[in-house]
Amino acid sequence: MTAVFLTFIFVLAIFLGFEVISKVPSTLHTPLMSGSNAISGITLIGALASMQLSHHGFATVLGTLAVILATVNVVGGYAVTDRMLAMFKKKDKGGAQ
Amino acid sequence: MNFGQIEINFVYVLSAALFVFGLKMLSSPATARRGNLISALGMLIAIVVTLLAQGLDYRWILIGMVIGGLMGMTGAYLVKMTAMPEMVALFNGFGGLASLLLAWSEYHQNPGMAPVIVIIAAISVFIGGVTFTGSMVAFGKLSGRLPQKAIVFSGQHLINAGILLAVFGAGALFYLTSTSLLGYLFLVLLILIALGFGVTSTIPIGGADMPVVISLLNSYSGLAACAAGFVVSNNILIVAGALVGASGIILTQIMCKAMNRSLANVLFSGFGSGVVKQSGDGGPQGEVKPASAEDVYYILEAADSVAFVPGYGLAVAQAQHVVKELGDLLEANGSEVVYAIHPVAGRMPGHMNVLLAEANVSYDQLVEMDDINPRMDAIDVCVVIGANDVVNPAAVFEENSPIYGMPIIETYRAKTVIVLKRSMSPGFAGIENALFFRENTRMYFGDAKASIQALVAEFKGGS
């Protein structure tokens, strides 16, 4: 039953994603990609939850690697997106600054 | 499910809402930065609440997060804006690999998972693996570590079809034997095949098609997270993964449409592999009219409206800052200046906009193709910098041209077109550009950056 419930969520989220993202102007497509990259680092949540004390050895190795990679995505993705978006400014007309 | 987990899941709903709000605020450059921070806040909340669960191994978590955080920060603050496509490709790959590892680790801990979940675990490692190696190849091509050209050889489709068949085979065997040691071996085999398929399916795609490929890999990285979410039954992974998946699919569609090609054509045709197709009537007619810096200066000096049309050549020459300087001088001289940007200019969607924003160009001067074309007849001068196929009138006039039907920035309709170019060599598509031979076109040969600097010097000396 859980699988059905999760599939529901999945399908609805896809539709929501289409609606929201089709409104993003092409000017912002690069930040959209790096920002969605950061969001796809959500795997981190699953990886964190899988790091149970009761697990040992190889499972810990796999989990730790997943945590590292997903954290790179989350931290790097949000940071670089912020850096890019900070550059998008509107200037007063006529002023060369 | 104990009380703690229910609470955690409720907080995930909040995170999901923040992600959606954040993406919604990306619809305008004015609110985009705040949107990104809201999305990051959603992520932070999700991370913190996940760490509140009982029985977690904090030691390894801390080590992993510190290493990953440092790597991410270093990358994010050191990367040059021109290298953004490589960076995004690299991050896509990491996301894919993380999802692969998560699904693998879940199976390692609990091989007796439900049959449905076994299938999804197989899908998860497959998408994750393809995303990882595919992104690494894209990264290699974009950063020049691998040849940019499409690598095609005979029987390539056959080999790829064979690999795909092997994927289904290994997946099916894994499903049938998932609880035994043999099943574990099939999973490892499946991972190896997926990693191989990522390489073989990406190498036949040429440099100019990279915007499509990174968009698609972006989508895959989301779908991989989604599949991993099914494996560990975590709804926030599914929601966030689906959002990213949808985003990548939309971008892929936009890129394909802007190139007037189907996704299948991009993925399988090896476009730009050096096969120069002949146009029916023996190529463009007319005479090339070269211009010197002084000639171009006089044309620009007299113009009321100027549209810069940047392409990948601008990024290669790192010319965005001098272009902005020239733009400012033109504005001071009384011209109206805009920057007209084709959707596939550059190596990833929106890349040119970021480079011009970096050079302090105001975002209301960045104009999309569909906004500039209707008023192109009223533009005095178009300055094409390092763009080629996206301004080729063959797309409009020559029915047997390979790019016929592709939407272009119709610079040929402007009163005068100045094309900055190193030489007369054709663009990535390997097609002669009739624009260079037109009556109203002047060719201004040389390195883009040096050429613009010469114009800036003319303006400073002349006025």
Image (spheres, coloured by chain):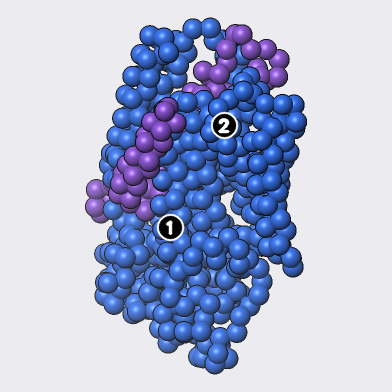
- Say few, some or many: other residues with alpha carbon within 10 Å of mark 1 (under 14 / 14 to 19 / 20 or more): some
Three-letter amino acid code at disc 2?
Pro
Horizontal side of residue B372 vs A31, given as left or right: left
At 51% from the left and 50% from the top, the residue drawn is B216
Question: Badge 2 sits on which subunit?
Answer: B
Crowd tier of the residue under label 2, counting other residues whose Cα lies within 10 Å: few below 14, some 14–19, many 20 or above:
few
* In-front residue for pair B441/A74: A74
Residue drawn at 61 percent across, 80 percent down = B277
Q: Quadrant of the N terminus of chain A?
A: top left
Label 2 sits on a secondary structure element that is helix
Q: Position of residue B391 (x, y in %)?
A: 44, 72
Chain letter for the blue colouring in the rendering: B
Report the residue marked by disc 1: B253
Q: Which mark is residue B232?
A: none
Comparing B362 with B391, the one in front is: B391
Q: Specify the colour of chain A.
A: purple
Tell me, yes or no, whether dots 2 and 1 are on the same chain: yes
Q: Which residue is mark 2?
A: B115
Q: Position of residue B445 (x, y in %)?
A: 55, 73
Could you tell which of marks 2 and 1 lies nearer the N-terminus? 2
Type of amino acid under label 1: Gln
